[in-house]
Amino acid sequence: MKRDSGQNREVTSKWRLQTQLVRGGTWRSEIGETSESMYMTSGYAYDCAEDAAARFAGEQEGYTYSRLRNPTAAMFEDRMALIEGAEVARSTATGMAAISSALLSLVKAGDHVVSSRALFGSCRYIIETIMPKFGVDFTFVDGADHDAWTAAFRPNTTAVFLETPANPTLDVVDIEFVTALAHEHGAIVVADNAFASPVLQKPLTMGADVVVYSATKHIDGQGRCLGGCILTNEELMEETILPYLRHTGPNISPFNAWVMLKGLDTLDMRVTRMCENASALADALVDMGGFDYVKYPGRADFHQHDLAMKQMSMGGSMVALHVPGGRDQAFKFLNALDIIDISNNLGDAKSLITHPASTTHAGVSEEARLEVGITEGMLRLSVGLEHPDDLIEDLHRAAHIAGIT
Ligand SMILES: *Cc1c(COP(=O)(O)O)cnc(C)c1O
């Protein structure tokens, strides 16, 4: 039936990405609504007690309680699984709920986790502070150093976590290398793909076992809702991750899942345009002179350009830059911007800039910050959908006022 064609994975898996983003997973009620329905319900009523019993016994298809499954969240999950090329997906209230659930469901006391050390601050906190409380040890490595990865594995290493490009340094991890190594040691690889988005990079095709997202970023991408997603194969989901999710309840609200579905409609257009704008801004920032560095994975002078372009179809929406005059000059520059907002969110339609050392990574020790290159002059720019010339003029003016150029 055409009404439910988005549900037929055999058909939808042959669609191109843009069609999948708009129609994948769509399930319509008997009313035939064009937009996905928002099922704001916590529970479900049964025609008879026998039906309730059958549903709980798993003998009858259908919903029982929204902590276990909700039709709107399920549409979002089916669409995410389709575009990622994963067998299954489950959505969560935030990106951190997705990451903590994926990691904590994989480990037990006595296990060891290996992770790249350039990480989103809260990811670092989970591995460094929360997991050790439950007897899980860890090793952080420089994500670009293959020898360090090789040396980090132990007989009890069960999980590997990586983020590429990493926040905020944009360091790239070689996904194929790390996953091959992890699999030799029987460890499961969880990849945080928030910076690249599913439009640019597919870690599962490079060997990763689990992909996690902060859907708050490019997937909503319009500053409205928090959300997250975990994608993997059926076996790992059913046996390991799902039991954890069902009993701990980090679910996304149906309303937010609906907003995310609307975000996916335009994800390809938005991410593509944001990458084009980011590329133009990175070039303009280099041309301005005065910055210690301008890092953009899509530029040939990026230190890991070849690897970045092997793994991603475009350079991404993020630019890292460094002013020579430390925190004072960085703040002057931010305060002089008229269009670009000072905000620690990213992947948004609005261009946003932040000073990681005093915001997203303020909770990380200075030593750990410096180890990954988060210095006082460093800024992270998330490029949005405004006209690039307006943004370039804004950056130009602010750089002049701050005495950078
Ligand atoms: C934002 C972000 C997260 C956390 O996601 P929330 O939705 O804010 O919980 C995790 N990893 C990366 C790379 C992020 O950018």
Image (cartoon, rainbow, N blue to C red):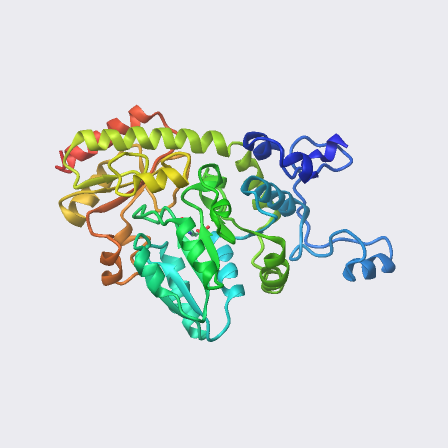
How many labels, in total? 0
Q: Residue at x 34, y 49 (%)?
A: 167
Going by the image, does 1 lie left or right of 349?
right
Q: Residue at x 73, y 56 (%)?
A: 64
Instruction: Look at the image and tell me in which quarter the C terminus lies.
Output: top left
Image: 35 above or below 145: above
Q: Position of residue 2 (x, y in %)?
A: 74, 30
- Quadrant in the rendering for residue 337: top left
Compare residues 235 and 296 and report the one nearer the observer: 235
Image: 247 above or below 39: below
Q: Position of residue 214 (x, y in %)?
A: 47, 48
Q: Residue at x 25, y 52 (%)?
A: 374
Instruction: Look at the image and tell me in which quarter the N terminus lies.
Output: top right
Q: Position of residue 348 (x, y in %)?
A: 41, 38
Q: Position of residue 357 (x, y in %)?
A: 26, 53
Going by the image, does 200 lie left or right of 84?
left
Q: Residue at x 30, y 55 (%)?
A: 145
